[in-house]
Amino acid sequence: MAFNPWLHSIGSFLPICWRGAACASILALGIWSGLIGHERVVLAVGCERGGIEPPVVNEEKKSGPQEGQKKETEDVDSKEIIGLLKQARHWREFGEVLYENISFADRERAAGFLARAWTELEKEFAQEAERLADVQAAFGEFYVGLQLLDRAEPMIRSALEAHIRLLGKDNPTTHASQTNLAGLLREQEKLPEAESLYREILKSRRRVLGEEHILTPWTMTRLADLLTYRNKFTEAEPMLRKALEIQERTIKENHKYTLETLTSLAFLLSELSRLEEADEVYRRVLESKQRSLGKEHVETLTAMGHVAAVLCDLGHYTEAESILRDVQEGQERVLGKDHPTTLWSGEWLAGVLHNLDKNEQAEKVSRDVIDAYTRIRGPEHPSTARAKANLGRYLQMQGNLSEAETIYRESIAVLRRLSGENDQCTLNARMNLASLLAEKGSLEAAEKLGSEVVAAAQETMPEKHRLRAKFHSYHAAILILMKRYKEAEEHLLVALPVLQELPGLKNKQTRRALNSMVELYAAWDKPQKAEEYRTLLEEANKPRTKWR
């Protein structure tokens, strides 16, 4: 089958899957570790073990690694840092030493230092079991921040076993150690195990600390994040709103934990396609971080990225591109090019470039992201597979069908095995493969695959989910090529009301679906219907005003 620009026009709006990246980046970086989604033990562990209530975050202190504030690893005497570690007494202090002296931007050098330091500290604290466990916990968390998960796991598990043995299951330090493990499991995509552990922690904290202790709603937010990622929206939303209600009543409105809960709520709202609500919440978080931390702080940059992501969903691609370029430049400077948060911004930037029809630029950004993921997480990781599936789309839009098909099939195999048959990114990659098959003329195979994806989306996604609507619209494009017009119409009539209501009339995805309607009725010899949707499409294509 020859290159079909109409099929490209219909298929090009198909969603690029950034969902896993967005969810992984939903929380700002940890106070010392840079570990997304992990507990700020600097506020809890040391104080609780001394019998003192965990303090409210000092909003005047700008946490997070800053350019010019952190010594680069190569400029620091390793013996001096090890000496500081030997003087530290507990988890909080070990973490502070690492955070203040070790750069995440130089991953291999940092990892080498940790290995040397552990060899000395293991001997130094051989007779101090609890102190040694705290070292392991801090080192394990730092390894996760470096995305060296294989090195992190034995440290974190050993620390937890020691904390349970020495302190008991209901001790606050044990809770923090469990949270460390739950965060690691989340990073490893071991989601059922992570969920079970978060539920255990929340149950224990409610019993020991009470519903309104600062760490109880914090734990509710961690669990709700995971539930959102697993499409358990009906449980996640009330849990987040309950956590937020407690936090707004018991701690400052702009407290770090409150802002994290707001960020999690905004992500859930975006997953439910309540985009304007999500935008309002994300901007509230961004404004607070700009006031308290400054525009160049790493957490502010992450918040800017979240705003850009919603702008992309709303179809404001030019504004999203401008913001994401600023965000990525800042994150590369502060965190390094290989940090997961920097890579998340790179994925979003590639997707925005794709939506602006800058597919050659999108390809270049995407290949850089994939190379980094392959180095730090390996080729058999969901993040790597997701990024490769997105690259397949950019190649397809440039007419490089052979390489795109190979990449799709490789990515689908990994995503199926690691994330599951009905994971959104798995389904999305399969739908993109169906698009490619249709473009190559394999319409029967394309229709069969598209039908399977639509059926899976109907079983696993809410009725008004944008991705489900997009799948209907895509499947209609294949059916139009097969001249099965009545079936195509049924799918488009399901998709269009959702796309018009949620992303909005001017969103590129909605405009592509409207174009499908025009082509459908023109091919079906229904000129009045075609003209009706052509008028609507012309309105949608009018230049838009700048968002906010």
Image (cartoon, rainbow, N blue to C red):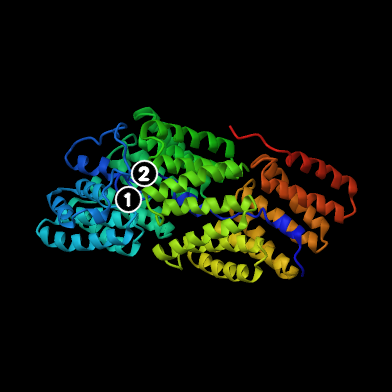
Q: Nearer the viewer, residue 112 or 21?
A: 112
**Image quarter of residue 429:** bottom right
Residue drawn at 66 percent across, 58 percent down = 454
Query: Is residue 65 found left or right of 501 in the rendered image?
Result: left
Q: Would you name the residue on which mark 1 appears?
A: 179
Q: Tell me if residue 217 can be seen.
A: yes
Q: Quadrant of the N terminus?
A: bottom right
Three-letter code for the amino acid on which mark 1 is drawn: Thr
User: Residue at (69%, 68%) from the top-left corner?
Assistant: 437
Element marked by disc 1: helix
Q: In this rendered view, identify the residue nearer to me: 266 or 301.
A: 301
Q: Earlier in the sequence, mark 1 or mark 2?
A: 1
Question: Is 445 on the left-hand or right-hand side of 209?
Answer: right
Q: Looking at this view, name the residue that lies furthest to the left.
A: 127
Above or below for 388 versus 466: below
Quarter of the picture holding the C terminus: top right
**100 w.r.t. 116: above or below:** above
3D distance between C-alphas at marks 1 and 2: 9 Å
Tag 2 secondary structure: helix
Residue 497 locus on image (x, y percent):
71, 43
Q: Where does the image place residue 120, in percent across and percent down from the top left?
A: 14, 61
Do the CB atoms of the residues marked 1 and 2 lie less than 8 Å apart? Answer: yes
Badge 1: few (under 14), some or many (20 or more) residues near its Cα, within 10 Å?
A: many
Instruction: Determine if residue 420 is in view.
Output: no
Quickly name the residue at label 2: 219
Q: Which mark is residue 483?
A: none
Residue 204: x %, y % from top left: 31, 46
